[in-house]
Amino acid sequence: MQDSLDAQKTQKDRNVLGQFSTPFPLALDMMTYMRQLMGRDDVSFIEPSIGTGVFYSAFTEVFGNRRQQVLGFEIDPHYFNPTKDFWKDSPIELRCSDFLTQKPDHLFDMLVANPPYVRHHHIENEIKVRLQNEILRKTGIRISGLAGLYCYFMMLSSVWLKEGGVSCWLVPSEFMDVNYGGAVKRYLLNHVELLHIHRFKADDLQFADALVSSCIVVYRNNKPVGDREVKFTLGGSINNPETDKLMRISQLEVDKKWTNIFTQEVQYDDQQAKLGDFFTVKRGIATGDNNFFILDKETIERYEIPQRFLRPILPSPRYIKENRIDSDHGMPIVPHQQFLFCCSSPESILKEHYPKVWEYICLGYERGVQKGYICSRRTPWYSCEEREPAAIVVPYMGRSETSNRLFRFILNTSKAITTNVYLLLYPKPQYVHCVKDENVLENIWHELNAIPTETLSRNGRFYGGGLRKMEPKELMQTPAKGIANLMIGKQEFQQLSLFNDL
């Protein structure tokens, strides 16, 4: 429907109104991020420029199609009328009007938007003056007449949010560098609680029909308090960026180019080295139901599951007594050898060509595996996340009274992946060559296991009964002077990029 409606307009007409629809995978990625940030499903949601409803579609996918209060605005009848008809059976209120002329009649928990990318010369002077005066009256900030329409959306929308409500904006990244963007930056620093800015790389255009470098800006509708930290991420997706760092509000100057934050270098002393300078740490995969997805050889034989649907997977850490996992042709030499069932083939293919595998899928249906939170959000539900094996893995929790060392680093020479009871260390791109050298990898492994338990525990979390846990970002905070000396040496360490996973 989106493509058909777009085709009925000229590119020039769409440029004038800034009508560039968000790709659904990106909308889904943003909604997934917001779900993690909100921490619950029962949220009210407003979208100021709904188009055909791509963000609402992502909202129902991630938050569920409950009877939450949802409101969407669309100024152009060309898109509004088909959209209203398309969503007529859904619990969403749609209004055909200009969002920037409306007064709130209800406050919302969340706003997610790709506002119209309309350049200043396409904004009528009367409208421009009205919006400038409204911003001045509400914030005391004077905004340049060169500002694009998206700037007015960002600075005027928080009146629709509850106190503590969250806004997430997909906007051009140019505001971080140009003079007119100073007004937006003042607003983000002094009027709301700026949480996160994710910038896509310049060659990673988010819109096939608009040559504009994009970013995602997230802020909370709270008055800013104290010298808090703001997360800046670059490349990849907002949920899985290539690099990230934290900046304090006091470090963010309005008259400086914020895009430099993503690229400038900093001088480090080797005493400041942290594990996150060299490794990205991730949790192992969440299957959605280990009893269904993790198979032993007997189950594999019974249901004649072919090798293409299987990946070796490490057993629970309690079955691994040594800190080294040897390999036999890629298979881990461990007790309780297990495999991950991961199949992306459609049901029709399985029924026709793999009847015994289909029988196993039906067993999952009988157990209700497909209804679980994780499985219900996958297509097909019996597929699993693709993940590369990691050369070093760490059990993410342990008890102080056990014989095994807390947070021990295990060298994995096999092709086995892990579930989320492990943390996985992946070298950053510039250090991949280090772990490919077996001697260097062994030395890194020994150095990691030489980190005192109390040093690791300091960054972890304590629970009753002596249980301790470590999350990925907490592990990346671990001091790693010895690792720095091994991987790049003191002189090269002076060249570390400012972008470290903190």
Image (tube, grey):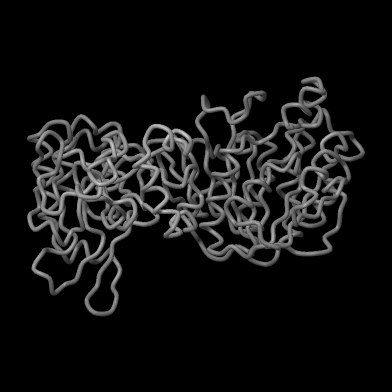
Q: Position of residue 402 (x, y in %)?
A: 12, 71
Among all residues in the image, which is located at the extreme bottom?
465
Between 288 and 134, the one lying in front of the other is 288
Q: Tell me what residue is drawn at x 26 percent, y 39 percent.
A: 427
Numbered label tally: 0
Q: Based on the displayed image, in which of its 4 quarters is residue 487 positioned?
A: top left
Q: Position of residue 262 (x, y in %)?
A: 46, 37
Q: Position of residue 473 (x, y in %)?
A: 34, 54
Q: Tell me what residue is drawn at x 65 percent, y 36 percent.
A: 22
Q: Tell me what residue is drawn at x 21 percent, y 61 percent.
A: 456
Q: Which quarter shows the N terminus?
A: top right
Between 487 and 281, the one lying in front of the other is 281
* Image height of 480 relative to 437, above or below: below
Q: Is residue 90 left or right of residue 314?
A: right
Q: Is residue 325 left or right of residue 272?
A: left
Between 475 and 378, the one lying in front of the other is 378
Q: Position of residue 193 (x, y in %)?
A: 59, 59
Between 134 and 268, the one lying in front of the other is 134
Q: Is residue 7 left or right of residue 372?
A: right
Q: Tell me what residue is drawn at x 21 percent, y 58 percent.
A: 316
Q: Based on the displayed image, in which of its 4 quarters is residue 225 positioned?
A: bottom right
* Image height of 407 relative to 113, above or below: below
